[in-house]
Amino acid sequence: MTKLTDSSKLSTGSQPTDSAQPAPKSSTEAQPTDSVQPPAPKSSIEPQATDSAKPPAPKSSSHRWLWLLLGTMAIAGTGAGIWYEFFRPKNNNFIPFSGRIEGYETDVSTKGAGRVEEVTVREGATVTKGQLLVRLDDDEVQSELLATKSKVNAAKQRAAAARLQISVLKSQVADTKLNLKQSEGDTIGKVAEAQALVSTAQSALKQEQARVAEARALLKQTKVDRDRFVNLANLGAETRQRADLAQTAFETAQAMLESRQAGVEVARNAIAIAQGKLTQAKTTALNPDRQETNISRLQTQVNQAKVALLGAQADVKTAQANQQLIQSRLNNLTVKSPIAGIVTTRSVEPGTVVLPSRPLLRIVDMKQVYMRGFIPGEQIARIWVGQPTKVYLDNDPKHQHPLNATVIAIDAKASFTPENIYFQKDRVEQVFGVKLSIDKPGGFVKPGMPADAEILLKS
């Protein structure tokens, strides 16, 4: 231990060992620029490894080496970056640029107003087309729909009753027309029969009148004979018996005349009876007119029933239209997804009262995402719509897994760089916006992601 102490004294410039513990630290700090000296002090202090005050010297030396190594690596990296940016061989077969992934957003809203009862999804949820998203309170609309259905049924019943009435009235019209035909036939027959009876009675009257004339002529002749034979009997030229016979013949002729005159009266009465029957038959001929009146009245009732039917049918259509309108309002209280995608924004919660066209949710179609970027004005002439491109995401820094894309839109007007620019030379450069459609996003290309692209040029 004595020799170790002596060698320590030689290396520290003959300083006391009991109170010179900071001396090695000062001797070490005095030689920071000498890159060869650190090994000597290390060997000089190694024998005093048991001294608790001497370890800081080698720790400080290791930190300097570490910082020296890091500084050298930083300088090398900076140089490599400058070389890659300015001195590496340029590939003129494509135009590189950067941008951001965007998507076609769809705002989902409702056509109806009401209180939100249920929201089935939240931000980040994947939805399918036609999936129920939001449901509004529908109690009031359900009541209106029930009332409208009752009106539809009532109108249908009125229409059915009108149809039934029309059917009954048409049956009555048909029956009346049959009675009319029968009545017309009966009337013709009765009139003809009565006319025949009148003719027969008139013929009988004429016969009786002829007999009366014959009886009168006979009576006149018998009277002349009676008077002559009575005068002759009074003069004695004829017998009294012959005068009595002449008197009897006269009385017989007179009785015959009276009988024949009575037959004329009977014939006249028969004519009167026949004419009465004819009049009755002709009066019966008025029955068809009465039947026609009944038919006309029934036809009027049929027309009234048809008008009632048309009104009932119109009421049915009106009620059905109101039912469809209320059903449409009821359907508008359930909001379904118009597309398949991912929910990015949820703007309402249950209990919120919403108005028509207010956005409730926002959905992005992940199958139709695109990249939006800007190209300097001097390079835009080399780009056209339909040009093939390659898109690279940040998880592919070495550009080993490109995504095929196509230029689908180029801004018609130039604009200044739209991002936050901190250098004057960049602020005055004009750029054109370019939109790239990614062929197969695969679901992992999401809006908001930064990306790089290479627009391929013709060789």
Image (cartoon, helix red, strand yellow):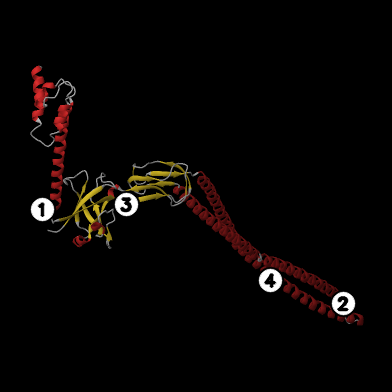
* Residue 89's disc number: 1
Q: Where is residue 184 drawn, in percent x and y?
A: 61, 64
Give me the C-alpha separation between circle 4 and circle 1: 142 Å
Can the viewer see residue 369? no
Q: Secondary structure at mark 4?
A: helix
Closer to the eye: label 1 or 3? 1
Give the Cα separation between the discs numbered 2 and 4.
45 Å
Residue lying at the far top of the rendered structure: 1
Dot 2 or dot 4: first in sequence order is: 4
Foreground mark, 2 or 3, reads 3
Alpha carbons under labels 2 and 1: distance apart:
187 Å
Which label's residue is closer to the chain start, 2 or 1? 1
Instruction: Residue type at mark 4: give it.
Output: Ser
- Residue that numbered label 2 is attached to: 243
Q: Label 4 belongs to which residue?
A: 199
Say which of marks 2 and 4 sits in front.
4
Residue that appears at 73% across and 72% down: 205
Asked where in the image residue 232 lies, by quadrant, the reply is bottom right
Reply above or below: 223 against 408: below
Contact (CB < 8 A) between labels 1 and 3? no
Compute the Cα span from label 2 to label 3.
153 Å
Determine the residue positioned at 44% across, 49% down.
332
Q: Which residue is mark 3?
A: 104
